[in-house]
Amino acid sequence: MKQTFTLSLITALMWLAAMAPAQSIFPGDGSDTPGFVPPPQQPKMPPPPPRSASSAETFIPFPGPPVVPQSRSEAKKPPRPPVMFTKLKTDHLLDWAATPNDLNNLMKKMKSMVSVDYVMEIKTLGEVDPNPESNPILFRSGHYRFEFSQGEREKLRKYMMDGGMLVLNTGLGSQPFYDSAVKELALIFPEVHLQRLSSDHPIFHSYYDMDRVRYRPGVYKSGFKGNEPWFDGITINCRTMAVISRWCMAVGWEENENDDYQAYESEDAHKIGANLFAYSTAQRAWAKQSAGAMKFVDSDDRSTDRMSMVQVIYDGEWKTRHVGLSVLLQSFNAKTDVPVKFGLKEMRLSDPAIFDAPLLYITGHENFRLRRDEATTLREYLLNGGFLFAEACCGRKGFDLAFKNQMQQILPEYPFVKVGSTAGLLNLPNPIKQVTVTPALAAHLGTATPAPLLEAIEIDGHVAVIYSPFGLAGGWEMSQNPYAHGLDDSSAIQLGQNILMYAVTQ
């Protein structure tokens, strides 16, 4: 009786909250700011978890019936499927539970779509086990401003670095929630640039090809134009561990059909949900396998007669791998006996010291743009004999297109040319006629052993730029991402050694 009364009271309070004009849930919640979108009307309690005995129900006043051993012929209760998504709840039910059946419906749909059987849980962040194996994906949806405590940020950071994934869903495209999500990820990962994921990101291809999606008319009424999915992501060591969906997935999972919602069409929302599951599962397994990557450091800081590399810093995800270059330099030293300075430098192209660097290295996954003064400096550096080694990490098209477009603007009179199989840089210290590529790239090319895939820019007979449109750094670390379009470990090391040798001997 008491439980029924409590549920009725909660339902009544929620109904009253839903009818309030501004639907404010706490002071400063953003409900009075431009871009706020209130939760859908008719909020409901989320479905209850499997029933378990409460503490009041554990007292048995009389002896119970005798225990009868279960015979082999009796049907046994099947084990509970493992948890895949954990929905984060807060003190504000109207916010986090605005779409109460979203994950439940997604789990049911995935059972028929991709033949997997998982369940979801509802917990506060404090109740969440920090081990990603217990709750692989944390899901937070909402409409209002929010913030984590510093302790929660530290817990989330460790959880994600250990292999977990955080998905933040902007309820009906509500701007205050989206802005809060952007701010929180910047606080959790201050060293990483939050960036919109390009349509070739593996998340959009891990099960279904979703580089183009169908939005509801409400998305376009907001002023957005386009049909590419909009996820912002935090990516470290080629693994995207946190994403913000700018447009709502949850109402699509609920199959709540309303054309005015700023949301994905239901079918596409389900497919993106399945992709999140596939991507997270593959990346979590890979993260455990690649956790022990090596890093080499100098025994001293002296740089006389030693070769050094400078990694270019730019506005965007400029650092995709943290140890690959040092592994390459160590292997180069062992192969050639050329002294190598392992303490790599990192600087912007606007730094005057860039002209003291014999070799620059630039990489990335996504679209980026150099500042005007940086582009001017790079042109001057290359025209004066400098050498730039560039790589599209994981073979990502976002970086590939951005890099080529900018080099065309920086050096319009010097186009990219294919590096032929007889080129000198393919002979020393390793004669390379063909390379071995990752399974993902082999499927794309139709062969696992193509000829070396390099492009170059020559200036007056001097090679100024060497560019690999496919990933090398993952191979240098001996841990290519399962979705990478790149070279395998041995080929990546050998090709990298040859490029360094070519740069040294020019």
Image: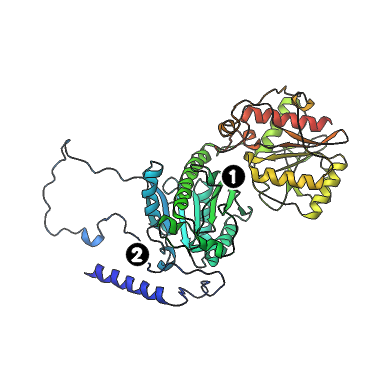
Badge 2 element? loop
Q: CA distance from mark 1 to mark 2?
A: 38 Å
Residue 451 location, x and y as percent?
Answer: 68, 26
Q: Is residue 149 visible?
A: no
Which kind of residue does numbered mark 2 sit on?
Answer: Met
Q: Residue at label 2?
A: 45
Which kind of residue does numbered mark 1 sit on?
Answer: Asp
Looking at the picture, does residue 421 appear above or below residue 178?
above
Q: Is residue 221 visible?
A: yes
Which residue is at a point 79% across and 30% down the rendered structure image?
502
Which residue is at a point 74% across and 46% down the rendered structure image?
405
Residue 455 location, x and y as percent?
Answer: 74, 34
Q: Which mark is residue 490?
A: none
* The quadrant where residue 325 appears: top right
Q: Residue at label 1?
A: 200
Q: Residues within 10 Å of mark 1 (few under 14, many from 20)?
A: some
CB under 8 Å between discs 1 and 2: no
Which is nearer the N-term, disc 1 or disc 2? 2
Which residue is at a point 40% across and 54% down the rendered structure image?
103
How is the protein colored in the picture? rainbow
